[in-house]
Amino acid sequence: MTEYTDADLRAEAARQLYAHRPGQNATITYAAMLDARIESTHTPDYDGLTWSEALDGTDLDAAADKVHALAVNAADTSEWAVELGADGLAPSTEHEITVNGEAKPIIRMLFAFEPDMPEDMRTSFVEGIGDSINDALGGEAIEETDDSGDSDSDVFALISGIASRLRDATDGGEYHAVGLIYDLAKGRTTVAEARAELADIEFRHV
């Protein structure tokens, strides 16, 4: 019997995942859309309009052509997907960093974490990478996004940015206090520790 490795298994899984991805054939794309529900029409009960209920004739043909083009031109991430699953990592639907060029994004970073990793650790990790990129690019091209809206990571990122600028513009006790805000936003201190430090700070105008 020919020996094979775990890497061989992963490579074959990636090949099959790529080979069976939907949309490689325009006819299959059209047929698969007929009973599929349109994402934006979903209800809390997972009900909603199907493509064939919402469109007919040339409108449905046009939509199917667009879906087919998106699927055919999609980046092949089959190997990454297999590796993530094999390593037990779960892609994050909340964390994303995009570096914008003059006309379009030039880098997009997505993240996958160990499922039991605490949210504050995930946030600190992503923000740390974002801060490093921001520093390297002068703070002009990076955009941190979160698909869920005003999430904790969005709020902490904004607080961190504000605190960083305030800290540069203050001194004495005020500098120390703004540093506490920054550390809280970064998860570098706890609420109890920050309260204890705050009690020892002397402010000039309070």
Image (cartoon, rainbow, N blue to C red):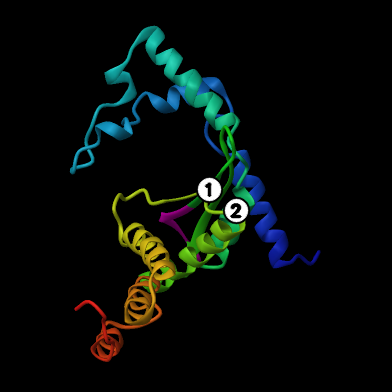
| Magenta span of residues | 89-96
Discs 1, 2 touching: Cβ within 8 Å: yes
Q: Amino acid at mark 1?
A: Glu
Tell whether 170 sits left or right of 150: right
The residue wearing badge 2 is 137
The residue depicted at 32 percent of the width and 34 percent of the height is 39
The residue wearing badge 1 is 140
Under circle 1, the secondary element is loop
Residue 151: quadrant of the picture: bottom left
Q: Position of residue 134 (x, y in %)?
A: 54, 57
Q: Position of residue 117 (x, y in %)?
A: 42, 73
In whole angstroms, how far apart are the C-alphas of marks 1 and 2?
6 Å
The residue depicted at 44 percent of the width and 23 percent of the height is 31
Residue 84 belongs to the span the image colors magenta:
no
The residue depicted at 60 percent of the width and 60 percent of the height is 83
Numbered tag placed on residue 123 in the rendering: none
> Front-most of 133 and 80?
133
> Front-most of 113 and 108?
108
Q: Position of residue 186 (x, y in %)?
A: 40, 72
Q: Quadrant of the C terminus?
A: bottom left
Disc 2 crowd rating (10 Å Cα; few below 14, some 14-19, many 20+) is: few
Residue 90 belongs to the span the image colors magenta:
yes
Q: Amino acid at mark 2?
A: Leu
Q: Quadrant of the N terminus?
A: bottom right
Q: In the rendered picture of this protein, how many numbered marks are placed on residues?
A: 2
